[in-house]
Amino acid sequence: MAILERNQTRRDPAQGSPPAPAIAIASVVLSMALVAVGNGLMFAYIPVRLGADGFDPTWAGLIVTGLSAGGLAGCILTGPLVRRVGHARAFMVLSALIVLSNAAVGAGPHPLSWIAARALYGFAICGLFIVAQSWLNDVVANAIRGRVMAFFYVAYVAGLGVGYSTLALIDIRAADAPLIGIAFTALSILPVGLTRLAQPPPPQAASVALGRAWRISPVGVAGMLAVGGLSMTISGFAPIHATAKGYSQADVALLLSAMPVGTLILQIPLGWISDRTDRRFVLVAASALAMVAGLFALGFDGGALAALVVIYVVWDGASESIYSLASAHAADRAGKDDMVALSSSLLFAWSLSGFIVPGIVTGLSAIYGTQAFIYVAIVIATGFCLFVLWRVVAMSPVPAAETGNFAPMTAQAPLPVDLAFPSEEQRRADK
């Protein structure tokens, strides 16, 4: 799989080019936040619209599976696209694909065309994240990289929340949602189109090495496999199930817009604790919390909205925390030369699980009903918790002094992948 590989010597923005202006960095962050508003709205709109028009919930599940398949393709093909046209043009091309996807949805509820449209969206949004993150990684100095990436993720999660809440304000049977999604995606092109942020040189291709990544960090790879399925299951099927249960459009909007709050609330304290102990202990706690919250979601299913909102906030936040904790744990155990292959392999594992698990949930939902996604999420969280416990018992604890710094992330966005940029010597040799 061609994604991205760094040379032995990678250009360090802290030592090479002058620091990028804050306003230029903010342009990329703002663009992704604007994209998130439209994306959040579309994520909520599709299952509610299908439910209002009487379509079987299986169609909404197939659309989630199609989105995940597109995301997997985006992880594979974004590297060659950036190499061909550069970061800024790749960003605009991918944004145009999201506009086309939303336009296809706006043409009316045709499930087969919506599956294709959302697969196109999945490809584009995954590619946008890889482009944006790698661009920021190249131009931001090491000293502030963690803070910039944390702000990047928080801005995206906040945008999703705004998009989710917008569902309550629109006419579900009109084309309002796709038009709003198109408008915000078009707006997102402007900051990047006008930015003075220097573009990195073309990246070089590399291969994913899952076996090598597993030898470096079994818990990290297992964490990505677990959270890829957990995130797409909870965020993708919660609106489908709520709609099938008869909750109103405003109720679904409230539930979805509240869920990102759990990510913002839980990740910081869990990350702070993980920086001071073996991260595997915190991963056990997060996965156990996700398992317990899933059981509560099952017990209170169809009950009072207020109780469900609290449960889903904790459920989503605990599940999302596994993503950043597993990524940080894997990075702790990798050498400098392993980082690119490791990040590409973790990205592939996350994408693969995000594709396979929604397909399984869709099949089970057709037999057992939309509640099946809760059982699947509980099984995944329980399995990962038991695996990490086994690793803790089998292997010696990792001293806190050997851990790196935690950075909050969201499992609805790909891992930050270091695109491999040629060294100064390589670029001079190529001229």
Image: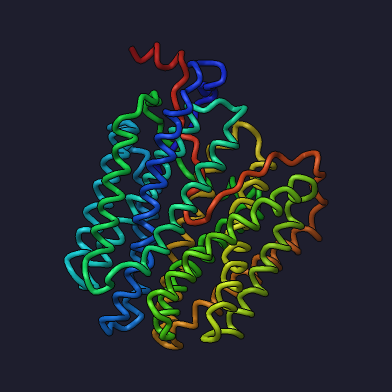
The residue sitting at 56% across, 77% down in the picture is: 306
Q: Quadrant of the N terminus?
A: top left
Instruction: State left or right for residue 366 relative to residue 332.
Output: left
Instruction: State left or right for residue 261 relative to residue 100.
Output: right
In the image, residue 151 above or below residue 48: above
Residue at the far front in the pictured view = 169
The residue sitting at 40% across, 45% down in the picture is: 32
Question: Between residues 242 and 229, which one lies in front from this camera angle?
Answer: 242
Q: Give the image location of residue 46, x and y in percent.
A: 32, 70
Question: Which quadrant of the figure has residue 38?
Answer: bottom left
Q: Quadrant of the C terminus?
A: top left
Question: Which quadrant of the figure has residue 23?
Answer: top left
In the image, residue 305 above or below residue 7: below
The residue sitting at 68% across, 68% down in the picture is: 289
Residue at the far left in the pictured view = 107
Q: Give the image location of residue 350, x and y in percent.
A: 50, 55
In the image, residue 299 above or below residue 360: below
Q: Give the image location of residue 278, x and y in percent.
A: 78, 50
Q: Give the image location of residue 277, x and y in percent.
A: 80, 49
The residue sitting at 20% across, 61% down in the picture is: 104
In the image, residue 262 above or below residue 274: below
Instruction: State left or right for residue 389 relative to residue 422.
Output: right
Question: Between residues 1 and 336, which one lies in front from this camera angle?
Answer: 336
